[in-house]
Image (tube, helix red, strand yellow):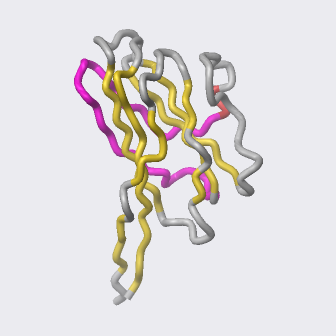
Amino acid sequence: MATFTQVQGTRTRILDLGTMASGYYGVSPAVDLGPNIPFDVTLEVEADPNGTPTGNKQLVLFAKLSLDNVNFGSGPESGTDTTNETDLLWIGTLPCNDTNMHRKMFSLQGLPVARYLKLVVRNDMGVPLASGGIYRTDITGTSA
């Protein structure tokens, strides 16, 4: 029987959320997953609220995919207009119920497979961030 082994790549920061204001979107630069697309990509999102969160108390993570690094899916990348948010591919939500640093892992598995992506995040915490960021690591594998 063959043995399949998963390998986790290096943790790399792909987006600095800085002091993102409440209600705003931010977007990462385009990420090239390479011609040999990994089996999965694990994302780590961290957020440190600047004050006590109110309202929805969350950061929301989305993706925009592209087959050619030119034509990405539609949806907001900046500003506060949520009209076309439903065009984005939802990845997950990071609850932020207090003033502590919050971290959560997400997977791209289950999304359509594409070589290029942009990550879009919306600060829905009711307060700005004191700091935050998004990290990625690729999950590859071998069979023996």
59 to the left or right of 75: left
119 to the left or right of 53: right
Q: Quadrant of residue 105?
A: top left
Question: Which range is magenta?
Answer: 88-114
Q: Report the front residue among 125 and 79.
A: 79
Q: Could you tell me which residue is drawn at 44 percent across and 70 percent down?
A: 140
Measuring from the top left, give residue 128's x and y in whole percent: 41, 16
Q: Quadrant of residue 82?
A: top right
Q: Is residue 94 magenta?
A: yes
Above or below, 126 against 109 in this view is above
Q: Quadrant of the C terminus?
A: bottom left
Q: Quadrant of the N terminus?
A: bottom left
Measuring from the top left, give residue 101's x and y in whole percent: 26, 29
Q: Is residue 62 magenta?
A: no
Q: Could you tell me which residue is drawn at 44 percent across and 61 percent down?
A: 138
Q: Could you tell me which residue is drawn at 28 percent across and 19 percent down?
A: 97
Measuring from the top left, give residue 34's x and y in whole percent: 59, 65
56 to the left or right of 104: right
Tally of numbered discs: 0
Q: Report the front residue among 36 and 30.
A: 30
Q: Quadrant of residue 29?
A: top right
Measuring from the top left, give residue 41's x and y in whole percent: 46, 56
Q: Could you tell me which residue is drawn at 31 percent across and 26 percent down?
A: 48
